[in-house]
Image (tube, rainbow, N blue to C red):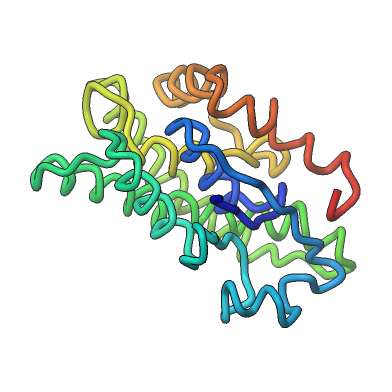
């Protein structure tokens, strides 16, 4: 049995769930109570010695890092979500890396400081917020232009690059990151958020904040 370990507030963990849902793979989802340090307990460290989420247990085969897990699941299912042809896969990897390194990383700076730092009694870093927003303003137009030429990031069909970007953008409303001027990106995002692989995880990222941790 495939088990995915995560937290509803973890975009990387949600990315793994989006992928498994899209592929139609049956799995058990185990929410870890991060506030109580469940991810640092001995039993979980046997699954992921780094003590972070997401992690996966596929009938005794353990894997961590969301990108590695998603690629594994795609190959396990033999899905075109992560194509096998060399050049097609390279294009998907290109946009997957762009979404991870240029979009998700900078969204996370803003999300952490505007959303999570105050909840944990920490002082938000205005410098980090400004830095994240500056880079996003430079990179969102690249994504918007690409989605104006193609219905999906890597071409005419959905791939793991789209799911990666979708998960990275999930908290933008709560972090007050405005996407409205990026018309193609907004249309693309709404289209994917309406699909079953997304709604089986949640209707919106904000739902996660309504539930107690670990529930």
Q: Is residue 48 among what the camera can see? A: yes
Give the residue displayed 68% in from the left and 35% down from the top.
Answer: 173
Foreground pick, 133 / 150: 150
Specify whether 204 is left or right of 78.
right
Location of residue 77 (image quadrant): top left
Specify whether 34 is left or right of 5.
right
Give the residue displayed 59% in from the left and 56% down from the top.
Answer: 108
* Residue 34 location (% of width, % of height): 78, 65
Q: Is residue 63 among what the camera can see? A: no
Location of residue 185 (image quadrant): top left
Give the residue displayed 53% in from the left and 28% down from the top.
Answer: 197
* Residue 158 location (% of width, % of height): 33, 28
Reply above or below: 95 against 127.
above
Specify whether 119 is left or right of 104.
right
Instruction: Count the numbered circles shown.
Output: 0
Reply above or below: 182 against 55.
above
* Residue 48 location (% of width, % of height): 57, 74
Foreground pick, 212 / 32: 32
Give the residue displayed 48% in from the left and 17% down from the top.
Answer: 191
Reply above or below: 142 against 151.
below
């Amino acid at each position: 049995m495939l088990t995915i370990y995560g937290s509803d507030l973890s975009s990387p963990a949600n990315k793994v769930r989006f992928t498994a849902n899209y592929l139609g793979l049956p799995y058990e989802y185990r929410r870890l109570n991060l506030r109580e340090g469940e991810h640092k307990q001995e039993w979980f460290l046997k699954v992921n010695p780094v003590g972070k989420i997401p992690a996966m247990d596929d009938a005794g085969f353990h894997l961590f890092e969301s990108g590695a897990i998603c690629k594994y699941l795609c190959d396990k299912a033999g899905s075109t979500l992560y194509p096998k042809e060399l050049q097609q896969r390279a294009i998907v990897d290109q946009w997957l890396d762009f979404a991870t390194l240029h979009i998700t990383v900078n969204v996370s700076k803003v999300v952490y400081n505007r959303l999570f730092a105050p909840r944990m009694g920490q002082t938000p870093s205005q410098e980090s917020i400004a830095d994240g927003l500056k880079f996003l303003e430079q990179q969102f137009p690249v994504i918007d232009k690409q989605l104006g030429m193609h219905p999906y990031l890597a071409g005419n069909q959905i791939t793991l690059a789209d799911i990666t970007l979708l998960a990275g953008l999930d908290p933008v409303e709560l972090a007050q990151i405005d996407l409205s001027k990026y018309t193609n990106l907004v249309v693309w995002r709404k289209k994917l958020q309406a699909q079953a692989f997304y709604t089986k995880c949640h209707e919106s990222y904000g739902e996660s904040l309504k539930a107690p941790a670990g529930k």
